[in-house]
Amino acid sequence: MNPAQALLFIKDFLLLFKAEVKRDLLFMKRYPLEPISFLFFMYLILFSINQGFSKLMKTETSLINQEKMILGYCLMQFVLATQMGWSGQIQNESQTGTLEQLSISGHRLGGVLFSRGTAQLPRQILSFFILLGAYCLSMPGTNIDLWAFYKAVPVLMIMAVGIFGVSFLFAGLTLIFKRVGFFFQIINFGFLGLFWQERAKLTDGSLPAFLYDNFPLTMGMEKLQAILVPSYSTKYDPHILFFIPACIVSAGVGYWVFRSMEIKARKYGLLSQY
């Protein structure tokens, strides 16, 4: 890519980014209850589960560390919001017949989705900390240092690159299969189970341990615990110089899969179905 092409690429991305920021702000202005009710709904799920288990067990002893439970759940919400911003919007546009118009515009569909995810990232980071703060206030004894948020924000931004790879994969599946909402819900709860794993209980050299050590989302989870939970200590602390490439590779693989599915969708005329 020569300098002129690079400049054109940057200009094209900034144009898309500006349009997606404006689109996101208009959405929040016209439908303010949508993001608020989503956060409230997500809050109620874990709060209700925690209260239910407390009543059933009648003890504060838990099978999982409360801080890890809260962080993992908030992180699942972060992943879910990103995924819904990509594959969920593709499903809506497919149903309304606007997906084909988007796909034949002067911009690549993958570029549109990437700019959309980047534009929504500040709102999703803010939602993450709002949800985390709500749990800290409503669950006494939660040992999470919210004042360390300035250290956690860069981790979330790097982690978002890895999440974009997962979102590209989900978006590609949506192009082919259209209605895949329940499948994604299963996958998202699978992520929650992954976040709640205890690394110390996994056997070194096993497949689960390898996935835990090299998957960008669990690497980010470990770093968030190290930053936000003062009492947390572990021998596994992914270095930032390994964490960043892992997220970039995840995004690259996700984009490659998305492009393959997009080509297949164009070949069989799936983009024009609604």
Image: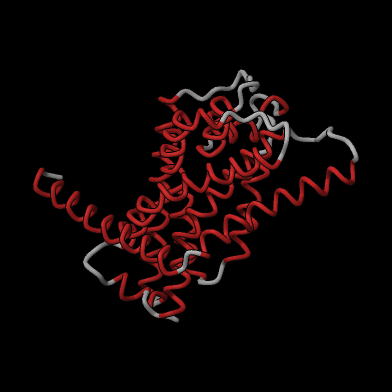
From the viewer's side, name the closer residue of 76 and 52: 52
Q: In terms of image quadrants, where is residue 60?
A: top right
Can you tell which quarter of the image residue 240 is in? top left
Between 108 and 12, the one lying in front of the other is 12
Q: Is residue 237 above or below residue 180?
A: above
In percent of the image, x 62 and y 59: which residue is there? 185
**Which quadrant: the N terminus?**
top left
| Quarter of the image that includes the C terminus | bottom left
| Residue 85, percent from left and from top | 45, 59
Judge from the rendering whether residue 29 lies leftward or rightward of residue 192; answer left or right. Answer: left
| Residue 151 in the image: above or below residue 31 | above
In the rendered image, residue 54, in percent from the top left (x then y), is placed at 84, 42
Q: Position of residue 160 (x, y in %)?
A: 44, 43
Q: Residue furthest left?
A: 4
Residue at 34% from the left image edge and 75% from the top image edge: 100
| Residue at the farthest front position | 137
Display coloring: secondary structure
Question: Horizontally, is 97 left or right of 54 in the view?
Answer: left
Task: From the viewer's side, name the closer residue of 46 and 105.
Answer: 46
Report the residue at 89% width, 46% height from top. Answer: 56
Number of numbered callouts drawn: 0
Q: Is residue 52 above or below residue 184?
A: above
- Residue 38 coordinates in the image, percent (x, y): 57, 59
Taking the spot 32% from the left edge, 60% from the top edge, the residue there is 20
